[in-house]
Amino acid sequence: MAKEKTVYTCSECGGSSPRWLGKCPHCEAWNTLIESVAEGAGPAKNRFASLAKTAAVVALADIEASEVERTATGIAELDRVLGGGIVEGGVVLIGGDPGIGKSTLLLQALDGLQRLNVPTLYVTGEESGAQVALRSRRLGLDNSRVQVLAEIQLDKILATLAATRPAVAVIDSIQTVYSEQLTSAPGSVAQVRECAAHLTRAAKASGTCVILVGHVTKEGTLAGPRVLEHMVDTVLYFEGDTHSSFRLVRAIKNRFGAVNEIGVFAMTEKGLKGVSNPSAIFLSQHAEPVPGSCVMVTLEGTRPMLVEIQALVDSGGPSPRRLSVGLDRDRLAMLLAVLHRHAGVACMDQDVFVNAVGGVRISEPAADLAVMLAITSSLRGKPLPKGFIAFGEVGLAGEVRPAPRGQERLREAAKLGFSVAIVPKANAPKKGSREIEGLSIHAVDRIDEAMEIVRGLG
């Protein structure tokens, strides 16, 4: 096949140049020329074919819709994040830090599918076949029949997919694949976008579920163009410290399931194992209650989880520090101001450190109440009662706002043996409804009410 002509298009004005220049010759913007391939003549040269077949215009109510069939991978936590399993023709993009376990988890999933007579293919561009086989031996995947292809050229990968027609194919990683239609190196923006588009089109046409492994930047986001995330059906992120044995897989986007769903794994000698009770990871085992510790119930996708919030308040001098791990630092500064104004707890000359135990990242505002109670507990040196939990969003006026699905959070806390809860009034069980057995619930409207109840419980 003849190599197509390469042009450079400006991302600002849309102008083109036959060669790369530091400055666009049309709008004179710097570093805006991106490599692309000029369209050839005739329909055979069209590289931008639609992912879906052309159809007539019909009313939405007249379109027959059916539930998407899923194939379970055999790894319960991975299936939870995917929304129940893999989908025929779906494209999944999974990213994470080097060495965090992306390849390990996918190799385990492919082996489980293969043992269920599901055709699989593992395309490796970063390792040789011998290295993949050695890793499978370490994971205890003896006599695995997963098909392995060590290749980085896009045309050969597409030809193999067409010839073998696997139900699930893993491309590890998309940054190593290159197309001969472009002259740039593998991993460049143009190559990643072009190769991902071809693989996505092949997945939709053949029904193969394609899983793309992506590198991440220093900021922890997927490397390459953001259009890559819009192109695929599901985006998963690996989270967690490589020095810790626990890993989180979070769904950032999922066309076939809930977003922000998480799967919890533990890294063992035999690979990643799902954790059935993740709340145990995020709770420290204190023999007796300690100052500065408060347990909250957070909601990750459809799963309520108990997480311990720890705070340390210490004298900080004229320039006190505010540091948070796993929580929004700017929100911490706001909560300290609300705590001073509406609850009379001043920390202006104190260093304040807040940490979510276990390396979990909490983005929902329902952590506000637990953070403020933990800070107050540390400042006064008085622990919160044993078996105590709290959750709720706190506004700038000092009001405590409800958290979504509060009843599920309370039932999860009661199931794990917690006995006292301070929650927003809207999340408390309504009169006449069934009480949550074993849990004493205190409903509050404002932050100063919560402080008074805590003092009374102490």
Image (cartoon, grey):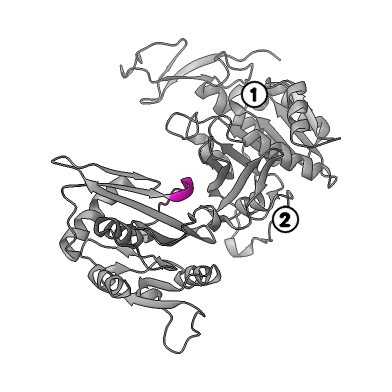
Q: Is residue 360 magenta?
A: yes
Q: Is residue 381 left or right of residue 251?
A: left
Query: For the residue marked with disc 2, what is the amino acid?
Result: Glu
Q: Is residue 150 magenta?
A: no
Check residue 304 in the rendering and tell me which mark sits there, or answer none. Answer: none
Q: Looking at the image, which residue is at 54% across and 52% down?
A: 281
Q: Is residue 143 left or right of residue 61?
A: right
- Where is residue 116 shown, x and y percent of the image? 83, 47
Q: Outermost residue toward the front?
A: 287
Q: Looking at the image, which residue is at 78% across and 40% down?
A: 111
Check residue 69 in the rendering and tell me which mark sits there, or answer none. Answer: 2
- Where is residue 188 shown, x and y percent of the image? 52, 21
For label 1, the SS is helix
Q: Is residue 104 left or right of residue 262?
A: right
Quadrant location, the N terminus: top right
**Between residues 162 and 415, which one lies in front from this camera angle?**
415
Q: Looking at the image, which residue is at 29% across and 63% down?
A: 394
Contact check, label 1 and label 2, Cβ < 8 Å: no
Where are the magenta residues, as a range? 357-363
**Of callouts 1 and 2, which one flags the residue occurring earlier in the amino acid sequence?**
1
Separation of residues labelled 1 and 2 (CA atoms): 34 Å
Residue 208 visible in this rendered orientation of the protein: no
- Where is residue 55 shown, x and y percent of the image? 65, 48
Residue 19 visible in this rendered orientation of the protein: yes
For label 2, the SS is loop
Check residue 45 in the rendering and tell me which mark sits there, or answer none. Answer: 1
- Where is residue 108 shown, x and y percent of the image? 73, 40
- Which is closer to the viewer, label 1 or label 2? 2
Query: For the residue marked with disc 1, what is the amino acid?
Result: Lys
